[in-house]
Image: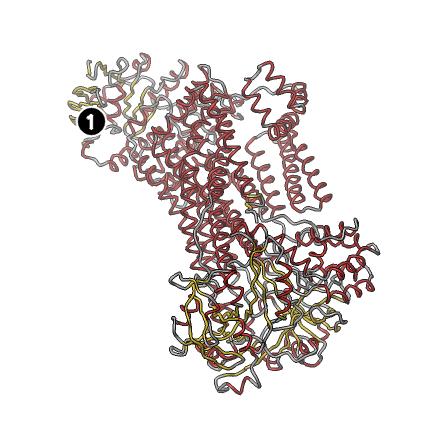
Amino acid sequence: MEEKVFGIPANTLAISMVSILIVVAIVIFFGAFRRFILVKMGTRNIPRRKGQSSLIVMGLMLSSIIIAVSLGIGDTVRYSVRSVVFDSSGNADEIISGPGRQLFGIEYFEYSEFENVEKLVSNNSNIDGILPYIEIDLPAENDKSGIAESRVQIRGVDGKYSDNFDDIKNLNDKLMSFNSLNSGQVYINAALGDVLDLNKGDTIGIYLNLVKEEFVVLDVLKSRGIAGANVTPTILFELKTLQKLLGKDGMITNIAISNKGDGAKSLELSDDVTKFLRSNLTNNQVAKNFFDVLSGNGIPALIKEEAVAIEERDKETSEELSRIASDLENSKFNVDFITSISDYQLQLIILGALDKAGLQEDAGKLLMMSGDLTTLRVDDSKNNGVKLAETVATGVTTIFSIFGSFSIMVGMLLIFLVFVLLAAARSTELGMARAVGLKRRDLVQLFTFEGTVYSFLAAMAGTSIGIGLSFGLVYVLQDLIDAGTFVIKPYFSLTSALIAFSAGLILTFITVFISAYRASNLNIVVAIRGLKEEFVKKAPEAFRTKVINLVWDLLFPIKQILRFITGKGGRLRNILLLIAFPVTWPVNILISLFKLFGKHSYALLGAFSLLLIFLAFQTETFANLSLGITGGVLSLALFIRFIISKAIKDNETVNQIAGTLEGGMVLLVNNLPFDFFDSITAEWTQPGPWFWPLGGGINTAAAVWLVMSNTPLLIFVLNLILSRFSGLKAVTKTAISYPMASKFRTGLTVAMFSLIIYTLMIFSVLNGINDISTEQPDRITGGYDIKGTISPEKAIQGDIRDSLNMDDFSVVTGSSSISVEVKEIDGENKTFKSSRLVSLGDDFINTNKWQLSYFDPKYGSNDREIWNSLSSDPNLVLASGSIIESGDPFGPPDRGFKTSMIVPGDLKEIQSINIEMKKRRSSETGSSLIIIGVIENLAGGTGFGGGGSTFYSSNNLVSTIAGEDVPNDTYYFSLKNKENASEYSQKLEKIFIANGMNAESLLDNIEEERETSNAFNKLFQGFSGLGLVVGVAAIGVLSVRAVVERRQSVGVLRAIGFRSSMIRTQFLIESSFITLIGIVIGIFLGVMQSYLIFREISKELEGASFSVPVGEVGILILITVIASILASVIPANEASKIYPAEALRYE
Amino acid sequence: MAASKKKISKKPIKKSTNTPKKKSTTNKKQSPVVITSSKVVKIYKSTNVEVTALDGVDISIKEGEMVAIMGPSGCGKTTLLNCLSGLDSINSGSIKLQNMELESLSDDKLSEFRAKNMGFVFQSYNLLPVLTTVENVELPLLVSGTSAKEARKKSEAKLDDVGLLEWSQHLPGELSGGQRQRVTLARALVNEPAIVWADEPTGNLDSTNEVEIMDLLTDLNKKNNQTFVIVTHSNYVGGRANRIIKMKDGKVVK
C-alpha cells in the first residue's frame, strides 16, 4: 500500500515539493548570477552579526523540526508495525479459515477442503506455497519453575508441507523440520522460551481438554513466521499429533498461502491471489443466482443510493457498492462481483437496503442462498497488516502535524517578525540604496537572498534535529505503550527527509518572500529621515486606472505575454509570473478587486463570504459555512468602521471602536458552541482535523487584534494599578509605553505566545476532564475488582464458586456472549448489523454499579430499577453506549449496529427502542427485543475501548438466541479485601490455569490507562510546547532590537537619573509584559475553546466535570515568563550598561 | 496626523513678574562656587587613534551663574559638559559639584545625584516619543521618588510655566521644534535642580524660537537662582549669558 502524507501519496508529495524547490532555486541562482552585488549586500550581515543570525536560524528551524518529527514518528510506527506484520506472517500472505458459521469457539474444517484448495492453487503461478495447520490458544506451564501462561498460541503444522513453505530455524540458525517431531515432542519459539524460562530438552506442561499433558521441548526456534512472532509465545506440534490430542482427527483450522517472491513483491500479488481464491472458493452458481436477483426490481439503483449514503462513513465499502451496482446495471457477472458478494458484511448492507425499500421477498431469497455461497473465508492478512501499519502511521503523522501546526504558525510569525525588525534596522541603509538607484524588486531580491541563506541553513538543521527528536520521542512512546508487546524500531525514510526539508524550506521561503516584499515597500524619504509612514501617503489611483488594471488582471496570461514581448517591468519577472499563473492569476485579480473597492473593500469581503455560505448550502459543507460566517461578520464590522470613520474624526478612537468590534465579532462567531448550527448542519460534511489549527489561528488573530486596538485602555488600566507603586512608576511607565507604541511587532509577538499557550491550555484542561476514573472508578469497573476471561471451549465446569474460597469474595458472577445481528424495527437503521449479546448472571444484575446514560422511565424510575427490570422480562435488554453514533473523526469506520433514535446530548429519559436480533449468519427470523436503556460509555466492556455495540440481558438470552447452551466466558469478582486485587488476579489465573483464565485487576488497569493517557498528553504537550522556544526566541530578538533602537532614549533616561538597574528592570518588565498579554489571551482562548470541546465530549463522556487546573496553569505562566525574562536578560544588561554620554553623542 | 492641523500655541510664556529683565550681577560675586574642575583630561581611544578631547581644563562656576561654553566644532565643548555633569568619566583631574567629588560617587549615587540636582536640555530635545508631554516632564520626579499625584501637579505647573499646559496630553511627535524644546526645558527644571546643563539648546531652532527659549532660560535663571551651563555655537546665546568660557583644542582659552 502506498504511503500517504496528509492524504497525498508520499512519493508524489516529495517529488512535487522538490520540483518546486528546484524551480525556486533556479530562479534565485539566476537572479543572483545577474546581480551578484545584491547577494553580497543581502548576505554580508549574516557573518557580521553571528549571534543574531544564529537566533534567526534557530527560530526558522521550527517548521522543519515539526514536520520532520511528525513524519519521523509516522515512519517509525509504519516501519515497526510492518516489521511485526512481516515477522509474524513469515511467508504466509493469505490465510484461509472456516466459513464463520460457528457462534463461538474455534471453527475447524475438514482436511479434504485443504486438498481441494491445493488442487485449485497448483496451477496458479502467483502462489508458491500452501500449508494446512491448526491454530488455537491453550494454557501452558513450566513444571519445574511453576511459571504458567494462560494463553499460549499452539500450532499444529503439517510437516509434509512445512519444509516447502517457510524456513524454521533454531537459535543457532540451524534449519529444523516438523517431520522430526514425535508425538511427545514440541518446538517452542524463543518468545515462549523467555516467558516460561524454558530451554531445549526441558519439559513443558500443556492443558489439553482441561488436563495437563507433558511434552519435551525438542528445540527452541527463532520467533518468526510459522514459529510465531516475537510478541507471540508459541508451541509447535506436528499436525497429526495435535489433531489426535485435541480429538480433531482429519480437521484443521487454517490454510496459509504464500505468494511468489519475497517482501513487497509478494504483497503486490496479494490482491490478485485473494481475488482468485475468493472467487474460486465461492460457489459460482449461487453467486450467479445472487447476481440475477440483484439485477431486478431496481435494486442496482438502491445499491447506488446506499453507496452514496455511507460514502462519508465508510469510503471503501461505498466504492465497492458502487462497483457492484454498475456491474449489475451492465449485466457484468465477473470475478470482481463474485469476490465482493462473498463478503458477508457487504451482503448484510445489501440485504438492509432491500429491506428498507420493501423488497423483503428478494431479501429472503438472498438470505436463503447466503449460507451456500462460500465454503471458506480468505483473509489477505499480510496486506491488511501493512494497511493497518499505513493507517496507524498516517494517523500518528496527522495528529502530530495538527498539534505541531500551531508551532509552525508561530515559527512563521517569527520569520515575519525577524524581517520586520531587520527592515526597520536597515531602513536608512535601504532608503539610501533606493535613493542611489536600486529598484524595489532589487530590495525584494536583496532580502530574499539573505532569507534564502537563513531558510536553507534552518531547513538543513531543522530536518536533522527533527529526525533526531522523532527518534527520541519514539523511545518515549515505546515506554508508554508497554514495550514488551511491541518493539519500536526507529526509522526515517528518504522520502520523509525530503518532504520535511522541502516543506520547511518552502514554508520559510514563502514567509521570507512576503516579508521581503513588505520590507521593500518603503518610502525613500521616510526611510532616510526615520519618519513615520503616515507622512508620505501615496496618491490614490484614479478609478479608471483601477478598472483598467482589473480588466488586465482578468486577462492575466495575455497581459504577461504582452509585457514579456514589450519588455515592460523586466522580462524575467514577467515570464516567472506567467509560469506561476495558477497562483498569480487569482492573486492579481483579488488585489485589483480590493484596490478597486478601496475603502469599500468590506463589500467585496461580504460578497465572497456570501458566496462561501451559498456554496456551503450547495455542497453541505460545514467548513465553508463557518468560514463564510466569519468572513461575513468581519465584513460587517469593517462596514461599521467605515460608518464610524465618517462620524468620528479622531483616528485613534475610530481604531479603538472598530478594532474592538472586528476582533470581538469574529471571536464571538468563531466560538459558538459546536452544535449551534446543528438544526441545519447535523448531516453536513464536517471539517477534518485541519480545521482546528485554522480556527485557533483565526481566534488568536481576532483576540490579538481586539487587545492591540485597545492599547490606550490597557495603558490606562495598567497605570491605574501600577501608580500604587510610585517607586516603580517611572520604570513601568516606559516599559509599557514602548511596546504599546510598536503595535505591529508587539502584536506579532503576543500572537505567538497566545497561539502556544492556547494549545497548551486546551491540553491541560482536557487532561483534567478524564479524572472521573479516580473519583468514581465504580462507574467503570461496575464495582468489581477482577475480571477473568476464558475461552468457551475451556469452560469452567459446574459452579465456579465451588473452586474458590468464598470467604475472600463478596461477589462472583459470570456472563456468556455470542455474536448476533441486530436491526431497528421502528427506526431508520433497518439493516442487520453485527453486535454482541451478553447474558449476565443474576448476581451481576443485582450488584453491578454501572450507570445508565439513557433509559425509558416506563421500566423504572432510576438506574437500579431499570437493571432490576431486566430480570423480570427476558425480552428487555440494555445497550452499550457504542450504539450511539459518535462522529469521531480519528477512528476507523464502525460497521456495528447503531441506533437512529438517540443522538449525543439527548435527555436521559428516552422511549424504549424495539429491535430485532438474530444469531450471526442465520436466515431465521430474529427475536423482537426492547432496549430499555443505554449504559454509560464509561462501562463499555469494563472500559478500555469496549469495542462495538453490545447488548446486555439476563435469563440466559444468549442460549435462547443461539439455540444451544453457551457457557460463560467472563467472570467478575468482588473481593472482601479490595487491596488484594492484583495478587488475587494472579491466584485466579493459577486456579483456573486449565481453563486458560486471563484475570486482571480492574483498578490496576484503570491506573495503567490513566498513566498512559497522562503520559501521552504530556508528550503532546511537550511537542506543542516546542513553539514556546520560538516565542522566547522572538522576545530575545525583540529585546536585542529594542536596545539598539533606543540607545539614545536610554541615554536620556540615564541623564535624568535612571539608575542602570532601573534600565535593566525596564527592559525585563517590557518583555514580561508582552509575554503576559500573550499568556492572558492564550489562557482566555484556551479555556473558552476547551469548554466548547468539553461541552461536546461531555455528551458522551459521562460524569465529566469542567475545571481549569489552576496549579498547572500557574506553572505554565511561570515557566513562560521566566523563559522570556531569561531571553531578554542579556539585551537588558547591555542596555543597562549603555554609557549616557556615548548614547547621547549619536544625536 | 491629527495634531498637525492644530494651531501651534502662541500662548506667551509666563514670566516672573517680580524679577527685572536685567539684574546686577553684584550679589553673584559673593555666591559660592558650585562647579569646579581642575586639570581635567579626557582622552577618547579607538583601535588606532587617540584623541585628547579635554586637555587640563580648569574652570569654576558659581551658584546662579549662567555660563556659555563656546568654541569651534570638535573643541571639546560637549565633552566638557558631559564630564562636568557626570554623564562621562574623565581620565585625570577632578570635578567637584556642590563640593562633591564626582569621581568618588558610584554609578547609582551619581544617577541619584543627577535625578535630584541636575536638569538636562539637548539640541535634539530627546523626549521619549511614546510618552505624552506631561509624562515626559514628570519622569525625573517619578525617578526621584515623588508621588504620582504630586509629580503630575508639579509637571503641569511647569508646563504652564513654559506655556504648553494645553498640549500636556499630546505626544512629542505632534509638537513643533520650539514647543518640544520648551517641553525639554520643563522636564529639565521640574525637579528644581541646582544645575541645568544645556547642550546647544537652540541649535535646531529658528531665531524667533531661539529668542523665546533664551528669554525663558534667563528668566528662570534669575527667578530660581539656578546655575545654567550652556554649550552653544550661537553668539546670541553667548550674549545672553553672564560669562562665556571659550575653548579651543580641548583647552579653555579665555
Q: Is residue A1092 visible?
A: no
For the residue carrying disc 1, how many other residues have a C-alpha within 10 Å: few (<14), some (14-19), or many (20+)? Answer: many
Residue in the foreground of this view, choosing between A21 and A589: A21
Residue A50 lies, in percent from the top left, at 34, 32
Give the answer, above or below, for where A162 lies relative to A595.
Answer: below
Residue ID at (54%, 82%): A811
Residue in the foreground of this view, choosing between A1124 and A1060: A1124
Residue in the foreground of this view, choosing between A769 and A170: A170
Left-right relation of A636 to B145: right
Q: Is residue B118 visible?
A: yes
Residue type at mark 1: give it: Ile
- SS for callout 1: loop
Residue A72 lies, in percent from the top left, at 46, 47
Give the answer, above or below, for where A976 lies relative to A180.
Answer: below
Residue in the foreground of this view, choosing between A647 and A282: A282
Q: In the displayed image of the protein, which residue is found farthest to the right? A: A297
Residue B181 lies, in percent from the top left, at 39, 23
For disc 1, the marked residue is B90
Left-right relation of A597 to A1143: right
State which quadrant residue A528 falls in.
top left
Residue ID at (22%, 15%): B247
Residue A849 lies, in percent from the top left, at 58, 75
Quadrant of the image containing the C terminus of chain A = top left
Give the answer, above or below, for where A640 lies relative to B11.
Answer: below
Q: How is the image coloured?
A: secondary structure
